[in-house]
Image (cartoon, rainbow, N blue to C red):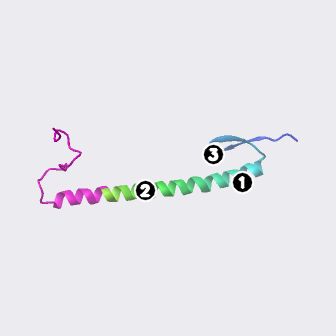
Amino acid sequence: MAEKSFFCPYCVKQIKADLIRGSEHSKRCKAIRDKQVAERAREEAALRQAAEELRTAGKTSTGSGGSTPAGPSSPNIKK
């Protein structure tokens, strides 16, 4: 019996497998994708939190009043 192809909606690939093996493949792909999505969401949340902390730190700062720090990376300082 010839193998049929199965479309995996998670890795978006056509797999040469019967429906049962294709279903097992999809379960693995879904688990991997869910893990990647959760990791990406955690990273984005951490970045948002860091950005918010920087924003609030800039508002409470009593420094020069500018939003850009004058440091070695600032242009036009080198001669």
* Residue identifier under label 2: 43
Residue type beneath disc 1: Glu
Residue type beneath disc 2: Glu
Give the farthest residue toward the right: 1
Q: Report, in whole angstroms, how far the alpha carbon at label 3 lies from the one at label 2.
A: 25 Å
* Residue identifier under label 1: 24
Q: Residue at x 47, y 54 (%)?
A: 40
Q: Is residue 53 magenta?
A: yes
**Nearest to viewer (mark 2 / mark 1):** 2
Which badge, 3 or 2, comes first in the chain's sequence? 3
Looking at the rendered structure, the secondary structure element under dot 2 is: helix
Q: Residue at x 24, y 45 (%)?
A: 73
- What's the mark number on residue 58? none
* Residue identifier under label 3: 9
**Residue 47, x across and y down, in percent:** 36, 55
Q: Residue at x 82, y 41 (%)?
A: 3
Instruction: Check if mark 3's residue and mark 1's residue have beta carbons within 8 Å.
Output: no
Q: Give the extent of the magenta segment.
A: 51-79
Q: Residue at x 77, y 45 (%)?
A: 17
Give the crowd class for mark 3: few <14, some 14-19, many >=20 residues within 10 Å: few
**Residue 9, x across and y down, in percent:** 63, 45
